[in-house]
Amino acid sequence: MFKKPWECKSKLFTVMELRLDATIDKLDNLTRDVEIKKMRSKVSSPAIILMVAEKMEYQYGSEVFETFQKGLRNMDIATQRNDLVPNKDDMRR
């Protein structure tokens, strides 16, 4: 009579332990699957990076600013010329 509650508790604990072990195993398998998928995606699609070697010279001061201003002036002149030249579609109408 005194043993029955103790036996019930021990059975309950063993069943709980088995279920917890099973869920832990399932979670481990899921994490492994995710890692395998990540590795496969990295291997299947390699990233190609194109690089160009250029000689870099740093420029400082007013010389750089002057070349920048000249570039802006040239862009302004080019846009003004494009505005003066009529489009082919306008001439057909």
Image (spheres, rainbow, N blue to C red):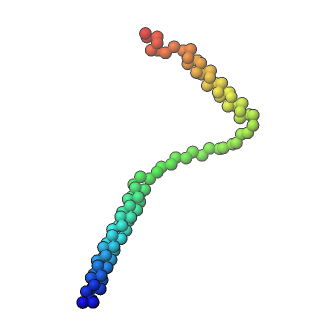
At a point 29% along the width and 85% down the height, the residue shown is: 6
- Residue 11: x %, y % from top left: 27, 81
Residue 82: image x %, image y %?
Answer: 55, 19
Quarter of the image for residue 23 reads bottom left
Q: Quadrant of the image for the N terminus? A: bottom left
Residue 81 screen position, x and y as percent = 58, 18
On the picture, is 62 further left or further right than 43?
right
Q: Residue furthest right?
A: 62
In the rendered view, does 49 fall on the left or right side of 64?
left
Residue at the location (73% across, 39% down)?
Answer: 60
Image point (52%, 46%), residue name: 50
Is 70 drawn above or below residue 31 in the view shown? above
55 in relation to 74, above or below? below
Give residue 61's quadrant in the image. Answer: top right
Q: Nearer the viewer, residue 11 or 52?
A: 11
Q: Look at the picture and state if 33 lies above or below 49.
A: below
Residue in view at x 71 percent, y 39 percent: 59
Residue 14 seen in the current view: no
Where is the C terminus found, in terms of image quarters? top left
Judging depth in this view, the residue of 35 and 79 nearest the camera is 35
Q: Is residue 82 visible?
A: yes
Q: Along the horizontal axis of the image, is 91 left or right of 72?
A: left
For the image, the number of numbered tags is: 0
Q: Say which quarter of the image contains residue 80.
A: top right
Q: In the rendering, at what x and y percent does residue 40 appear?
A: 39, 58
